[in-house]
Amino acid sequence: MDTTVTGIGSVVVAELRAAGYMESTIGQYEKSIKALACFAAERGGVYTPALGAAFASMTISPRTGRFSAQRSFDYSRLVGVFDAYVLTGRVGLACRKRGGGGPRPVSREFIALAAAWDADMAGRDLALATRDAYGRVCRAYLVFLEARGIACLGDADGSSVLGFLDSLTGTWATSSLFWVVSNFRPFLKFTGRNDLVDAAGLARVRRSHAILPVLPDEVERLVVHACATPAIAARDAAITLLAVTTGLRACDIINLRLADIDWRARTASIVQQETHNPLTVPLTDLLVGRLADYVLDQRPDSPDDHVFLRCVAPHTRLSDHASIHRVIATVFGKAGVTGVRAGTRLLRHNAASRLLRAAVPLPTISAVLGHASPESTDLYLSVDEERLLDCVLDIPAGTRS
């Protein structure tokens, strides 16, 4: 096997083209390969993981003299591909995310603690989105401790928890802090430090119970009509219609597989990522039609059996909640809908309110939405103004002024 930079580079570029990558992306790879070749020429020209690590650490732009996020991403992406080829003899083209889940601790103990927490979550088969959320707040707390000179959890006390939560008030909305604490508490319990768990309770962060917004009927009609036209790509139309008509969570739309769809019965059967409960939802005629358009005519040829794939190579499943949000927001824009923060959370609430207005019993709505507990559906009563007004008592005549 040729392990020179030029030899590996030619194999990588050939694989990128064969996989259908855009020429602009291939051009970025070629630019990084050229830089790596110049770097390696002074060191024998043979690629090794150690050489790759030294190359990837060159994150300062010679033009500006400052850290370059683009250079860091391009170089580390290329090194990852080269390392995989040297170790396995194959070119791995998995997607790499920018950012990487927030800041990470650097002390040995905290790195090990964060890794143990991630392994514990994986062992309990928590949904990937849940693990990401729990892991992000765990690492942020450990980085907060390191910034204050604490490199051992045994040296942390309850005030560090309160200080950490207080430090977030500038970047998190008050109404969102409840979810931060909810994601933080499982990690604190994992550490076995009851004093830290109690400290999180002392923060007294309360959940906000705002009245949930819903789509006006005219807006929903505009979106559905747009999804029926060729102006909206079949994939994007199907994703939006799934969210509008079924209220599926973004993680369940992402993880939907071809075998989950019963085309004759016009249903989709899944095991929910969040609750691990089975759920079968009906599919409308329009949704089935747009799904068929996508699967038969527009879906990229890929061994990945997820229904919805990336439009550009690598043709793998959509990455996260943000990718679904972008699709839905784009569809709303093309439908002429403005001023609406479109996303699966809004459309999930909208589906529930539509069923409620149709006098569907709450237990049935709970089953359709796949709630783990029927009580979860009580929240949607806040959008049913008619029934709320029925609960208002008349003021006794004697008390009127």
Image (spheres, rainbow, N blue to C red):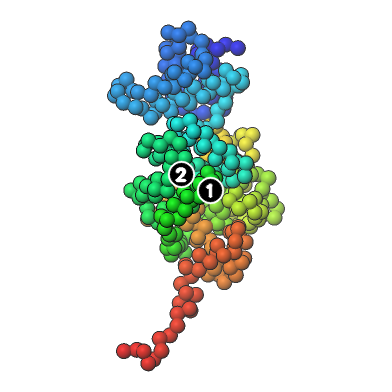
Q: Secondary structure at mark 2?
A: helix
According to the picture, the residue beneath numbered tag 2 turns out to be 137
Q: Secondary structure at mark 1?
A: helix
* Circle 2 or circle 1, nearest the eye: 1
The residue most toward the left is: 64
Horizontal placement of 54 versus 123: left or right?
Answer: left
- Measuring 69% from the left and 51% from the top, which residue is drawn there? 262
Position in image of residue 12 (x %, y %): 54, 20
- Residue placed most toward the observer, 155 or 200: 155
According to the picture, the residue beneath numbered tag 1 turns out to be 189
- Residue placed most toward the observer, 146 or 38: 146
- Measuring 50% from the left and 61% from the top, which residue is drawn there? 350
Q: Counting residues from the N terminus, which is met first, the one under dot 2 or under dot 1? A: 2
- Residue placed most toward the observer, 299 or 297: 299
- Find the distance from the CA under tag 2 to the CA under tag 1: 14 Å
- Measuring 39% from the left and 40% from the top, which residue is drawn there? 144
Horizontal placement of 394 versus 13: left or right?
Answer: left
Circle 1 Cα neighbour tier, 10 Å, few/some/many (<14 / 14–19 / ≥20):
some
Question: Mark 2 is on which residue type?
Answer: Val
Horizontal placement of 386 versus 263: left or right?
Answer: left
The residue most toward the front is: 155
As drawn, 313 above or below 181: above
Residue 357, can we see it?
yes
Position in image of residue 353 (x %, y %): 51, 65
As drawn, 319 above or below 24: below
Question: Mark 1 is on which residue type?
Answer: Lys
Position in image of residue 365 (x %, y %): 59, 64
